[in-house]
Image (cartoon, helix red, strand yellow):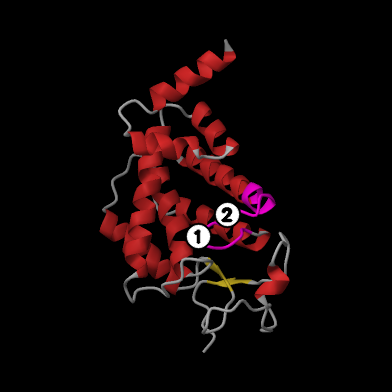
Amino acid sequence: MKKVLIFYFIFLCFQGFSQTNWQKFKKLSCAEKTWTLFHVFKAKKAFEISKEAQYVSDSIAKTPLLDGDKNSGQVDAFKHAYWMARLHQEIGKNAAKSLGEAHERTNYQQYKNSSLEDGETPDKISSEMDLYNNNIGLSFTQKGIPHPKDGLIYTIVNAIVAGKLKVVKKDSKKNYLTCEGTFISKKTLKGKWENNKCLVDSNFNIN
């Protein structure tokens, strides 16, 4: 009976979704699927906003507004802040925050399975960065209150340029650095959840 109810909840949530989106849902982690079951009437909107956040951040990466870095850089920070801001606007703060936390639990499972996220194995410092930027993103909007998307984009970009979000410290060639500025070899990072990467303000400039 429990399995029947779970399937029914999923069916309700994804009514009208394309076959492609259904396939994507099946690939979600246990934590994200659990979130879906507890937020069945919000999940479709959350799924749409997640795609929107990816599309907007990919577009931002092609502009000179930020550093173009999708892996622990300014564009990555933008994606998480925009994602949470839009989720807060559409499904509420608590639901948005819990989805962000579910996603970070997924990153730990990806690390354990040696899976990649945006081309790199997730680690503790990148998860801390994401959660920090998620919380900042939640502050940019209110549930049900309209906020033009272009205005939201520039609000977040300006916050990043002002150093209000976090990125992982890198040199001009996108090599990771310790807090003291020492080069970190990729070989030493392999297979480690905890490492000596360093979180810095989003306006950090090695130059």
**As rendered, which of 108 and 198 lies closer to the eye?**
108
- Judging by the rendered image, the residue that carries numbered circle 1 is 118
**Mark on residue 84?**
none
Disc 2 residue type (three-letter): Leu
- Judging by the rendered image, the residue that carries numbered circle 2 is 131
Residue 129 is drawn in which quadrant? Answer: bottom right
Q: Regarding mark 1 in the picture, which secondary structure is present there? A: loop
Q: Which residues are magenta?
A: 108-122
Residue 24 among those drawn in magenta: no
Residue 145 coordinates in the image, percent (x, y) = 32, 43
Residue at x 49%, y 31% (from the top left corner):
36
Residue 51 coordinates in the image, percent (x, y) = 37, 48
What type of secondary structure mainly makes up the magenta span? Answer: loop
Graded by Cα atoms within 10 Å as few (under 14), some (14 to 19) or many (20 or more), the crowding at tag 2 reads many
Q: Earlier in the sequence, mark 2 or mark 1?
A: 1
Q: Regarding mark 2 in the picture, which secondary structure is present there? A: helix
In the image: residue 136, left or right of residue 41 = right
Residue at x 60%, y 46% (from the top left corner):
106
Dot in front, 2 or 1 = 1
**Alpha-carbon distance for marks 2 and 1?**
17 Å
Disc 1 residue type (three-letter): Asp
Judge whether 14 appears above or below 184 on screen.
above
Judge whether 123 appears above or below 28 on screen.
below
In the image: residue 35, left or right of residue 90 = right
Residue 113 among those drawn in magenta: yes
Residue 65 coordinates in the image, percent (x, y) = 35, 74
Residue 85 coordinates in the image, percent (x, y) = 41, 50
Residue at x 53%, y 78% (from the top left corner):
174
Residue 130 is drawn in which quadrant? Answer: bottom right
